Amino acid sequence: MSIAYLNGVWQPAEEARVSVLDRGFLFGDGVYEVIPVFNGRVFAEDRHLARMARSLGQTGIKPPMPNDCWKHLFAEGIRRVGEASAVLYVQITRGVSRVRSHNYQNEEPTVLVLASGWPEYEQRPHDVVTMEDFRWSRADIKATSLVASGMIRNGAIADGYDDAILIRDGKVTEASASNVFIALDGMIVTPPASRYLLHGITRAVVIELAAAHGLPLQEREITHAELMAANEVWLTSTTHEVWPVASIDRCKVGSGEPGPLTNQVNSLYQAYKRSQTASSVM
Ligand SMILES: Cc1ncc(COP(=O)(O)O)c(C=O)c1O
């Protein structure tokens, strides 16, 4: 069951409607966040709000409300959905135009919060293919225009893979909806945060946890050859968390099973998540 908050009104998601003149509909002109809720508490709320503010700033969409109002709205969504584990999908479009035009018309943003129970996301190791990153060069903005990502993910699936790891100018950027980490000769490596990849919240948490627990980690470019030679590869995202890759381009990564660093990082992430969403944490 999903509950929608649309421009001030809570309603069943299937009943929520927007105008065909909404720039989100006509141009994919909007930004979004996917925010997890565990134990009835929003995980990494301030980080998601900060990234959303950045996406709004970069696209020049008016910020619809201050952070304390967002937090209140999220709490209300959690209350209405009535499940301890939930996911909040937040989308802000530039709003409804008077006429279809590339020119902005001082629209008022359209605000959608979809609150749903946490779906069981698949965690099995994934078989991925490498593919040219043909998306736009502002992948750091969490924009709703995801046609390229859909083509990439579904192209990979049509060819018998689970997902694709993207390569731009010979270097790994990210996967279709997650960030990439490799372990190579005991060193964890992930591509640096740039305009070519989303600055994932899970990525940032993993980097901080590695530093706090003395795991060697570098943020630097990864070549296609290094990716193929890696002992371990994992993906990170809010919904799949720390997620092992079994094979790349039909070649096994290590033994094909999650490796020791993948398991260690996953344990650290799970423990951190529990600590941040325990009942005593406000
Ligand atoms: C392209 C892309 N990269 C990375 C991520 C991971 O980001 P996060 O950890 O904030 O969920 C996502 C999440 O949806 C994504 O779409």
Image (cartoon, helix red, strand yellow):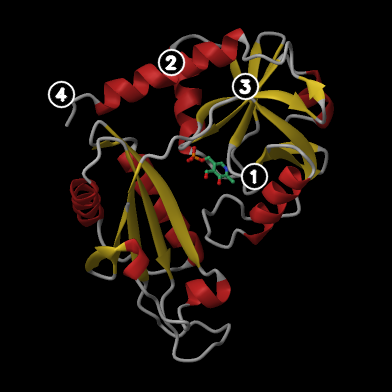
Mark 3 and mark 4 lie on one chain; the one further toward the N terminus is 3
Q: Which residue is mark 2?
A: 268
Q: Which residue is mark 1?
A: 176
- x then y, percent, for residue 135: 70, 55
Mark 3 and mark 1 lie on one chain; the one further toward the N terminus is 1
Please identify, in this view, whether the residue under mark 3 or under mark 2 is nearer the observer.
2
Q: Is residue 138 visible?
A: yes
Please identify, in this view, whether the residue under mark 3 or under mark 1 is nearer the observer.
1
Q: Residue at x 58, y 25 (%)?
A: 124
Q: Secondary structure at mark 2?
A: helix
Q: Quadrant of the C terminus?
A: top left
Name above or below for residue 108 compared with residue 251. Answer: below
Name above or below for residue 15 compared with residue 176. Answer: below
Q: Residue at x 58, y 11 (%)?
A: 261
* Other-residue count near label 1 (Cα within 10 Å), few / some / many at <14 / 14–19 / ≥20: many
Mark 2 and mark 4 lie on one chain; the one further toward the N terminus is 2
Q: Gap in Å between the C-alphas at discs 3 and 1?
A: 22 Å
- x then y, percent, for residue 221: 72, 31
* Other-residue count near label 4 (Cα within 10 Å), few / some / many at <14 / 14–19 / ≥20: few
In this rendering, the count of numbered labels is 4
Q: Which mark is residue 218?
A: 3
Residue type highlighted by circle 1: Ser
Q: Which residue is mark 4?
A: 280
Q: Image quadrant of residue 280?
A: top left
Residue type highlighted by circle 3: Gln
- Disc 1 Cβ-to-ligand 1 distance below 8 Å: yes
Side of 156 where 51 appears, left or right: left
Q: Is the residue under label 4 in contact with that under label 1 (CB below 8 Å)? A: no
Q: Gap in Å between the C-alphas at discs 3 and 4?
A: 34 Å
